[in-house]
Amino acid sequence: MRNTQQRRMMLDVVFSQAGIFDADQLIERLPGRSTPGYVSRPTVYRTLAEFVEAGLLQKFELDGRSVYQPGIGSEPTDHFFCVECRELIEFVSPAIADSVQQVANDRGFQVAAHRLVVSGTCSNCRQRRRRTKRRVDLV
Amino acid sequence: MRNTQQRRMMLDVVFSQAGIFDADQLIERLPGRSTPGYVSRPTVYRTLAEFVEAGLLQKFELDGRSVYQPGIGSEPTDHFFCVECRELIEFVSPAIADSVQQVANDRGFQVAAHRLVVSGTCSNCRQRRRRTKRRVDLV
DNA sequence: CTAGGTGCAAAATATTTGCACTGGT
DNA sequence: ACCAGTGCAAATATTTTGCACCTAG
């Protein structure tokens, strides 16, 4: 894989601040068109796919779009998704991982990865909410 | 909610055979254009959203598109996703649900639902596979 | 009768591809 | 120099919206 300016730029941005992002958010953090380190949209998508292929990023779908999470060989992370503030809260649960492995073993399924999104209301929004009604967009 | 021909057609198809489907698969099972029970694409999307809102269907994202699962108030179902044959295999695990609830309690998160997709290789494909190499598209 | 529902066409969104050109090695 | 990589424009795929017409209640 060639060490191009575009890939260097993307790696810098992707790993400078950990956290989940989508293609647009990444592009926003990169230099704009006709600015030194500009990376075109197709290249962003192509390169993200390469990073996923290489294991530098994990990819999954949230809310209709593809999101990417840095983490090289890190343990699988799960997420709470607050349907009020739309925030993603990461967590790690060995108990869940174990249960997944257990069920998989029972069924003869070989686990490569798992993706868990728990939707509901985060503690902040629960406290802030008092008599407000709202619809629940499940993920 | 009005009892229209379109909604009746869609309910028939959606609940005649249980299982996960996307908008296109549903449309394929409905009568074609200029056939008696035809339902237009926009109406299919609008009505699917209503069914989700009404709790008749659950919606989530898989492989870049929206998929729908029938089941009125059923217990949350989880899935294995075989990256070889692209098949979805449903399972229910009280252990996982408990663990999720446990972690949520610890964090003050109120759970509305959860969505778990475990990607890997199903038992059929593990047996069939011998010396074939393949890339892994995680979900 | 009349609001909610529908179909059509077109828009919006997200992602991918063909192709000529550029830059890394 | 060679070829992987890139940018541009356009294509694809999916879902949504504006609007005029239709129909269930």
Image: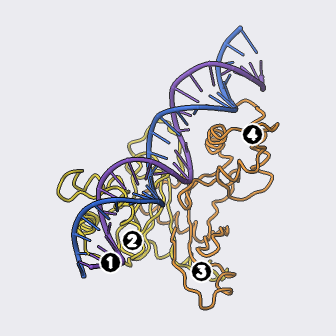
Chain colours: A orange, B yellow, C purple, D blue
Labels 3 and 4 touching (C-beta < 8 A): no
Residue at position x 74%, y 43% in the image: A10
Which mark's residue is nearer the viewer, 3 or 4? 4
Element assignment for label 4:
loop
Q: Separation of disc 3 and disc 2 at Cα?
A: 32 Å
Q: Residue furthest left?
A: B36
Foreground disc of the pair 1, 3 = 1
Residue B50 image label: 2
Q: Amino acid at mark 1?
A: Met
Please give the chain letter of the residue carrying mark 4. A
Point out residue B86 in the picture as x, y percentages from the top left corner. Answer: 42, 49
Give me the disc on residue B102: 3
Q: Quadrant of residue A122?
A: bottom right
Q: Position of residue B45 (x, y in %)?
A: 39, 61
Q: Residue at x 69, y 46 (%)?
A: A56
Q: Chain under label 3?
A: B
Residue A107 is situated, as x and y percent measured from the top left of the image, at: 41, 61
Depth check: give the residue in front, B65 or A3. Answer: B65
Among the two numbered marks 3 and 2 on one chain, the one whose residue lies closer to the N terminus: 2
> What is the quadrant of the N terminus of chain A in the image?
top right
Q: Are marks 2 and 1 in contact (CB under 8 Å)?
A: yes
Establish whether labels 1 and 3 are both on one chain: yes
Q: Residue at x 21, y 54 (%)?
A: B31
- Label 4 sits on residue: A33
In the image, what residue type sits under mark 3?
Answer: Gln
Q: Is residue A64 visible?
A: yes
